[in-house]
Image (cartoon, grey):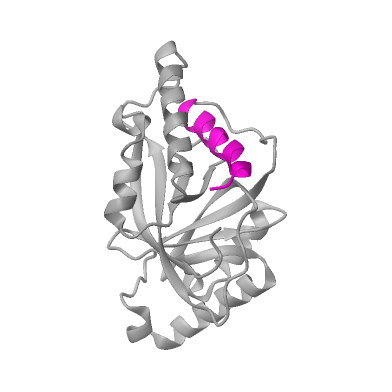
Amino acid sequence: MTKHQIPLLILLLAIASNAVHAQKPESKLVEFEMAILKRGPNWTPDLAKNAPALQKQHIDYVQSLLSSGKIVIAGPIRDESNLAGVYIFRTKSPAEAKSWADADPAVIAGHMIAEMHPWWSEDVMKKPSTPLQFTTAYLAFLVRGEKWTPEVTPQTEELQKAHMANIHRLADMKKLVVAGPFGDDGTLRGIFVFRVDSLEEARNLTLTDPAIKAGRLALDLHPWLVPEGILP
């Protein structure tokens, strides 16, 4: 994690710790649109085996979005949750991003549905390596916990400071490689992306967060298969 990424992490802290509507952040942050892909009504396990033609159409479409720069990172979620994958779009408008997500052949077929959210990050994603290969990262959604409250109090401010200190620690360890807040002030507060050796290691790192320990935030962690070379 480089020094120029620290403002991003501080902003994530501020939005995750306070129940304010996300305004356009200052500094070098860019607004992206994130499509969280969930299992649709026509979900087919093991698409490559059970619907190879649809799998090829889906992969070809995603690769076209990557090569055109419309998607900065995309990949499937590899676990038994209801999540199928995540796309992050570079776009001029939420409507444009939604149209791209909805045009995915797997979405058209009802294999997946796309849930759209504005998301802020520094523009740190790189071009994928060629030929295209994949690696496993770990994507942690930070969500409102059982003890989330909208009030800002001395206690929540102290928790915010502790949360910030832990984010700096994770950044200094160079295992937290991408982070950023959602811009719609909903249940989802932000994400951490870890490049570590295992899901257990990612979970242990995230569970050191004082806001998670206090129940103000909660963790939803998934293995995420992403193109090699894209993550900073």
Location of residue 141 with respect to 134 vertically, above or below: above
**Residue extending furthest toward the right:** 92
Location of residue 152 with respect to 100 vertically, above or below: above
Report whether 192 appears left or right of 80: right
Spot occupied by residue 133 in the image (x, y as percentages of width and height): 48, 77
The region drawn magenta spans 1-18
Give whichever of 68, 39 is nearer the camera: 68
Most common SS among magenta residues: helix
Which residue is pictured at 55% across the width and 81% down the height?
60
Give whichever of 137, 65 is nearer the camera: 137
Asked if residue 79 lies in the magenta stretch, the reply is no
Location of residue 47 with respect to 73 vertically, above or below: below
Report whether 215 appears left or right of 130: left
Location of residue 55 with respect to 193 vertically, above or below: below
Which residue is pictured at 35% across the width and 56% down the height?
222
Spot occupied by residue 129 in the image (x, y as percentages of width and height): 57, 75
**Residue extending furthest toward the top:** 154
Spot occupied by residue 59 in the image (x, y as percentages of width and height): 51, 79
Q: Could you tell me which quadrant the C terminus lies in?
A: bottom right
Q: Quadrant of residue 66?
A: bottom right
From this viewpoint, is residue 42 visible? yes
Give whichever of 213, 208 is nearer the camera: 208
Report whether 195 appears left or right of 200: right
Which residue is pictured at 32% across the width and 37% down the height?
208
